[in-house]
Image (spheres, rainbow, N blue to C red):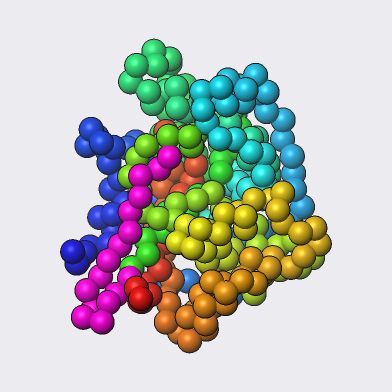
């Protein structure tokens, strides 16, 4: 099937065809081509991990329910000027986001019976959610639409059903990769790729080639360069495609998913060929 409007893929629906609640950024600031080597429109002030406390009883309850939870480093969006063209991000521990995630999840659950102080307060608009204090960390996520083209110029876009073991958007169909973003720096060592490009390439290797170890912080050799994830035949093949100019990255916009409170950037990786 040929998709004439790639943006339509981001009108994500559940199996009951109900549109997921989200706050969309109505400005064009996060729309347009991406430079492979630049962090723009993101800005990482420090690669140092800022660890935040979390409710251990909540974590244990979620694990008993079958959710996979690790406390790996992840990027989050701190409070900032809402109308800025640059989105500041910091490195935090993943579990530090659970307070916000579970609070919003209970408010958007039709059967939850909870009040809606967040939905009636900070989360009444995209800009307000960025600039007001929140009861937890807002993670940065990426929804990446990968466009494969065959020799007849027909386009193919892979989708997958998210695992029931994930905390966020479990069981829903989504573009692939769909991930929580991580830093492109290890200490003073920085990837040759910008924050968004680095995450797209790393997640591509994990999802399409099954290299799951590169997403596991515990398997990352201490003190190694971030680009160690490409030191494998699949990574070298992917970099040859990128370096040949065979792949173009662009952004399609931003939203805040109100089911778990992550800020999600839409990305298109086009011109890849499916061999």
Please give the name of the residue rendered at 19% of the width and 67% of the height, measured from the top-left corner: 2
Is residue 128 on the magenta stretch? Answer: no
Please give the name of the residue rendered at 51% of the width and 58% of the height, measured from the top-left corner: 210
Q: Is 221 in front, or is 192?
A: 221
Is residue 184 visible from the viewing direction of this image?
yes
Outermost bottom residue: 244
Is residue 158 on the magenta stretch? Answer: yes
Please give the name of the residue rendered at 62% of the width and 55% of the height, measured from the top-left corner: 213
Q: Where is residue 152 drawn, in percent x and y?
A: 21, 80
Q: Which residues are magenta?
A: 148-163
Q: Where is residue 220 drawn, in percent x and y?
A: 72, 56
Q: Where is residue 111 drawn, in percent x and y?
A: 34, 16
Would residue 259 be found to the left or right of residue 197 on screen? left
Quadrant of the image containing the N terminus: bottom left
- Above or below, 88 against 163 in this view is below
Quadrant of the image containing the C terminus: bottom left
């Amino acid at each position: 099937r040929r998709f004439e409007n790639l943006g339509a893929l981001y009108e994500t629906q559940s199996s009951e065809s109900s549109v997921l609640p989200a706050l969309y950024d109505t400005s064009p600031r996060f729309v347009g081509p991406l430079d492979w080597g630049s962090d723009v429109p993101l800005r990482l002030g420090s690669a140092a991990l800022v660890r935040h406390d979390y409710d251990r009883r909540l974590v244990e309850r979620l694990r008993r329910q079958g959710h996979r939870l690790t406390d790996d480093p992840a990027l989050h969006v701190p409070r900032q000027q809402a109308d800025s063209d640059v989105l500041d991000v910091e490195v935090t521990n993943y579990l530090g986001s659970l307070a916000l995630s579970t609070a919003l999840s209970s408010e958007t659950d039709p059967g939850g019976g909870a009040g809606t102080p967040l939905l009636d307060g900070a989360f009444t608009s995209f800009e307000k959610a960025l600039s007001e204090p929140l009861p937890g960390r807002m993670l940065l996520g990426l929804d990446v639409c990968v466009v494969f083209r065959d020799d007849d110029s027909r386009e193919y876009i892979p989708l997958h059903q998210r695992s029931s073991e994930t905390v966020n958007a479990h069981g829903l169909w989504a573009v692939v990769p769909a991930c929580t973003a991580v830093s492109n720096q290890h200490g003073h060592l920085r990837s040759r790729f910008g924050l968004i490009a680095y995450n797209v390439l790393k997640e591509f290797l994990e999802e399409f080639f099954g290299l799951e170890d590169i997403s596991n912080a515990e398997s990352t050799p201490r003190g190694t360069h971030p680009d160690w994830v490409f030191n494998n035949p699949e990574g070298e093949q992917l970099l040859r495609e990128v370096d040949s100019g065979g792949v173009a990255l662009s952004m399609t916009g931003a939203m805040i998913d109100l089911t778990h409170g992550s800020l999600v950037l839409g990305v298109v990786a086009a011109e890849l060929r499916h061999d």
